[in-house]
Amino acid sequence: MAKRTLLEIVQEILNDLDSDEVNSINDTVEAAQVASIVRATYNEMISNRNWPHLKKIIKLDALGTSYPNYLKLPDNVKELISVKYNVIGDGETRVQYKDLTWKYPDDFLQYTYSRNSDNSNVEQIQDISGVVLLILNDTAPQYWTTFDDEHIVCDAYDSAVDDSLQANKSQAIVYQETAWVHTDGAYPNLPEEAFSALIEEAKSTAFIVLKQMANQKAEQKAGRQQRWLARKAWKVQGGIRYPSYGRR
């Protein structure tokens, strides 16, 4: 099924509901209700899985010298997959992006608290919560954690290169949500193959909400589409390597 605009989806559902024809989602109260059902259905579908088309590479936000070992996820990030940082040294010109290694918060604290706070290269940085962390200030970051599912806390930063971690030296692979656009000509941000599931799910809900009756055919189609989408997640293989178990 080709992609449909919000108006086209609403018109199709209204037609199956045997309702009045409309030229805009705001023409009738029922059209506006169906458009809201489509939006709710879309939001549920987006939240239920990590859609490949929402996978992006982005820069993280920097927090400056008050939190020199911190980076922050943008607000519209649904899930963080990996973090890289350009660990280029002082006086070097070669770009060197390296993966930062995740540590669980308790392991991160145990690792950093093993440092000697009397050493000149160990800086006492106050976390956003007020807790003091022992952070190296003479080397690039190697490990990271998060205490609030929003801020990326690194174990080090190189003050000879920058006075804090820099946004333009960060790379993150994430699943990033996009805002819903509630207008006639807007296309829901889904791949083409997901539009059938969106329409059938919304249609099934519309029959229950607006007609106080179930539409068995729409429910069956919606179920089939969701099962198919669960199997067919990636347009491209998505970088996943499947084991061969010795087979050629």
Image (cartoon, rainbow, N blue to C red):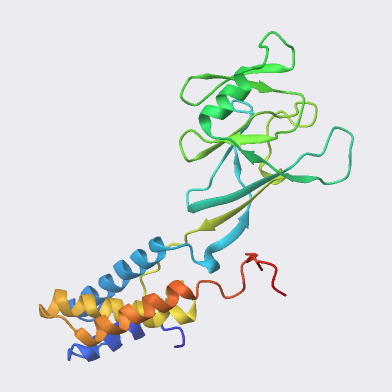
Relative horizontal placement of residue 102, taking residue 38 as reference (left or right): right
Residue under the image location 50 percent in, 52 percent down: 79
Question: Can residue 233 be seen in the rendering of this structure?
Answer: yes
Q: Position of residue 235 (x, y in %)?
A: 57, 75
Quarter the C terminus occupies: bottom right
Q: Where is residue 204 in the image (x, y as percent from the top left)?
A: 23, 79
Query: Relative to 227, does residue 99 appear above or below in the rendering?
Result: above
Question: Can residue 187 be seen in the rendering of this structure?
Answer: no
Relative horizontal placement of residue 210, taking residue 51 as reference (left or right): left
Residue under the image location 54 percent in, 68 percent down: 53
Residue under the image location 26 percent in, 70 percent down: 36
Give the residue at the far left of this rendering: 212
State how many labels appear. Answer: 0
Q: In which quarter of the image is residue 89?
A: top right
Q: Where is residue 104 in the image (x, y as percent from the top left)?
A: 54, 34
Q: In which quarter of the image is residue 26?
A: bottom left
